[in-house]
Image (spheres, rainbow, N blue to C red):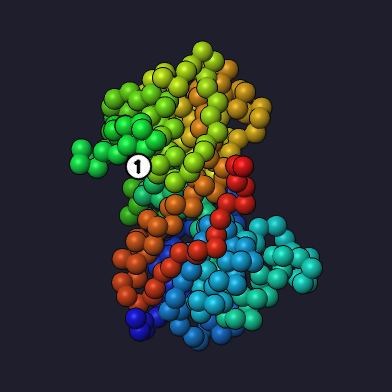
Amino acid sequence: MLRNGLLLREVVQRLEGFAPLWLAESWDNVGLLLETTRSLAERVKEVLLTNDLTEEVASEAVSRGVQLIISYHPPLFRPFKTITQDQWKSRIITLCMENNISIYSPHTCFDSLDGGVNDWLSSFFGVLKPDFLRCYCDYIFSFTDFESKRPIIPAKAPAGVETSLNLAACGAGRVLQLKSKITIEDAIQIVKSKLQLQHVHLALAKGAKKSSCVSTVALCAGSGSSVLSGVLADLLLTGEMSHHEVLDAVHNGKSVILTWHSNSERGYLRSLQDDLSKLFNTEVGFSISSTDLDPLVTV
């Protein structure tokens, strides 16, 4: 498809309207991270979406001829003192600059956003129509519905900033109160099927079994231990937690499902692709990286 494209500053303006940068955590590094010289005059017609900007993804972006990479995780986070070819992130930056590819990262803006990464994870526990009932590994389950859903740490707009966002639905993590109880086994199968994983890590609360029922689920994409700490829930779902954080959870009556960090985030790119395609109509095209993978596998 022939696209008219938009100037980079126009693309950035729409992205920031979709998910304002003030939604991000204070420690995060979000927004336009790399702006090439040619991008000041040339139009962005194609964008590559990725969870992590690795060298493989950067090479894929060059081969696809895109003008912008939206990398969920910021590839520029800690300060650079040198940009040399013996450092992998430096090689990515120089490759992108040489090929007129700018870089934008939303990270925790999208985590906090109403309809963002954590709401995508929450949707796993939403209603499933009867005609979509599935059987996985000879285990049949149906979805429940929310009695309530709320952020664990609510978002706040900066003083003097007016927003059309539903701030009550924005913030870090989510707590789900389910209308009907489900078993921990139900939750495992739901997560595995939705994330297309063969395995997840499970820690059962003290005295719990896979057949034990849960009515509250607290979740946070990525590394969610700081957000989930102290929350009242039967089940915690996140990408990764430390050994001692898991021990603390199970001894406080909470079962834990871990998926590996980026496995809890990457699938959101499909939802994001749909949202951005609607936001930009046909002016800009959005594709998802085929080389972006979690570096960890269970063998």
Residue that numbered label 1 is attached to:
123
* Quadrant (top left, top right, bottom left, bottom right) of the C terminus: top right
* Quadrant (top left, top right, bottom left, bottom right) of the N terminus: bottom left
How far across and down, in percent of the image, does residue 104 sit? 53, 66
How far across and down, in percent of the image, does residue 63 sit? 54, 77
Q: Is residue 277 above or below residue 136?
A: below
**Is residue 245 among what the camera can see?**
yes
Q: In front here: 238 or 162?
A: 238
* Residue found at x 60% / y 42%: 298
Residue at far top of view: 207
* Residue found at x 52% / y 22%: 204
How far across and down, in percent of the image, does residue 208 sit? 48, 16
Label 1, secondary structure: give it: helix
Displayed quadrant of residue 33: bottom right
How far across and down, in percent of the image, does residue 9 sit? 47, 75
Q: Is residue 145 above or below residue 298?
A: above
Q: Is residue 299 left or right of residue 80?
A: left
Q: Is residue 33 left or right of residue 158?
A: right
Q: Is residue 89 left or right of residue 156?
A: right
Q: Is residue 145 left or right of residue 243?
A: left
Give, as a three-letter code, the residue at label 1: Ser
* Residue found at x 39% / y 73%: 285
Q: Is residue 26 above or below residue 246?
A: below
Neighbours of disc 1 within 10 Å: few (<14), some (14-19), many (20+): some
* Residue found at x 52% / y 69%: 69
